[in-house]
Amino acid sequence: MKWRFSRQSPEVRDGLGAHMTVRVQIEDFDAGAEINRMRLNRPDTGAVAAFVGQVRDLNDGAHVTAMTLEHYPGMTEKALESIVDQARQRWDIFDALVVHRVGTLHPTDQIVLVVVSGAHRGEAFSACEFIMDYLKTEAPFWKKEQTPVGERWVEAKSSDDSARERWTGNQPENPT
Amino acid sequence: MIKVLYFARLRETLGMSCEEIDCTPDTATVASLMGLLSTRGDVWQQEFDGCRPLRAAVNQTLAPNSATIKAGDEVAFFPPVTGG
């Protein structure tokens, strides 16, 4: 079938909102506004999936009073754009947005936002989760926690590697 | 010359965020550069002797230890990432 907003049409895709956005910023973000912007961007959107990560006040048994996020300017943006591009190649999504904060954050502060839109929920859910799993293991950010007993660098978790690895297996990945 | 960057724990432990190193056979690959840095001893040896988890990037892309390095490249060393 040929629809005016066919997802398979590259010219429609390029013209109507295949803009990928990656932002690394100190400032907070408005998840609702970002979701609405993407939702209204094109009328053939049927699903918008979003993930928000926030600072916890407890990690590895210690009370966390604040956290400082460091990153590798230049590589961070390249890595995030590459991850979004991989998601776009795997799933037929319309748009994707990644916003990641850096600097000093406190418990309940937002850290990261991923928003993905598509025609149906399957692609949007899967791509959103894929982007987060790859961000956790490939994007050059590092967290340093402030606790009552001093500062400490957060150690990478093997569970994050496992979460990423499941996308490289042969199991079904797109439950549409 | 190559530009070498250090981030997070490495930057603090080594007391340095960036330096330039002359190209020699010791800087031909990520692994050989790590060997060269390790010979500085003390904290350098601790970080680059292969015992602590370490990641490398060449020209802002994650790279294996076998990756080659050429003049003008930007090489970065850092701990496994913990964003998100």
Image (cartoon, coloured by chain):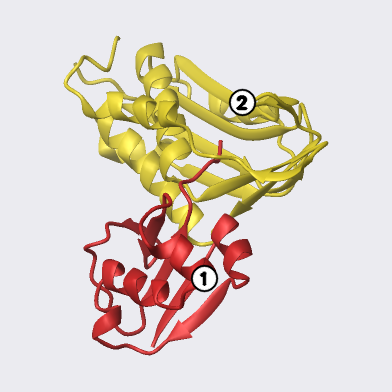
Chain colours: A yellow, B red
Q: Residue at x 28, y 16 (%)?
A: A174
State which mark lies toward you, 1 or 2.
1
Which amino acid type corresponds to the residue marked 2 in the rendered image? Val
Residue B42 numbered tag? 1
* Place of residue B50 in the rendered image (x, y in percent of width and height, measured from the top left): 35, 57
Residue B47 or B16: which is nearer the viewer?
Answer: B47
Q: Secondary structure at mark 2?
A: strand
Q: Please give the chain letter of the residue carrying mark 2.
A: A
Q: Residue at x 63, y 63 (%)?
A: B12
Q: Residue at x 46, y 34 (%)?
A: A96
Residue A37 or A44: which is nearer the viewer?
Answer: A37
- B25 shown above or below B44: below
Q: Residue at x 63, y 26 (%)?
A: A60
Both marks 1 and 2 on one chain: no
Which quadrant would residue A45 be assigned to in this image?
top left
Q: Which residue is mark 2?
A: A52
Which residue is farthest front? B42
Which amino acid type corresponds to the residue marked 1 in the rendered image? Asp
Q: Secondary structure at mark 1?
A: helix
Which quadrant would residue A111 be assigned to in this image?
top right
Q: Please give the chain letter of the residue carrying mark 1.
A: B
Mark 1–mark 2 Cα distance, whole angstroms, equals 41 Å
* Place of residue B78 in the rendered image (x, y in percent of width and height, measured from the top left): 48, 57
* Place of residue A9 in the rendered image (x, y in percent of width and height, measured from the top left): 25, 32
Looking at the image, can residue A150 be seen? yes
Looking at the image, can residue A91 be seen? no
Which residue is farthest top? A176
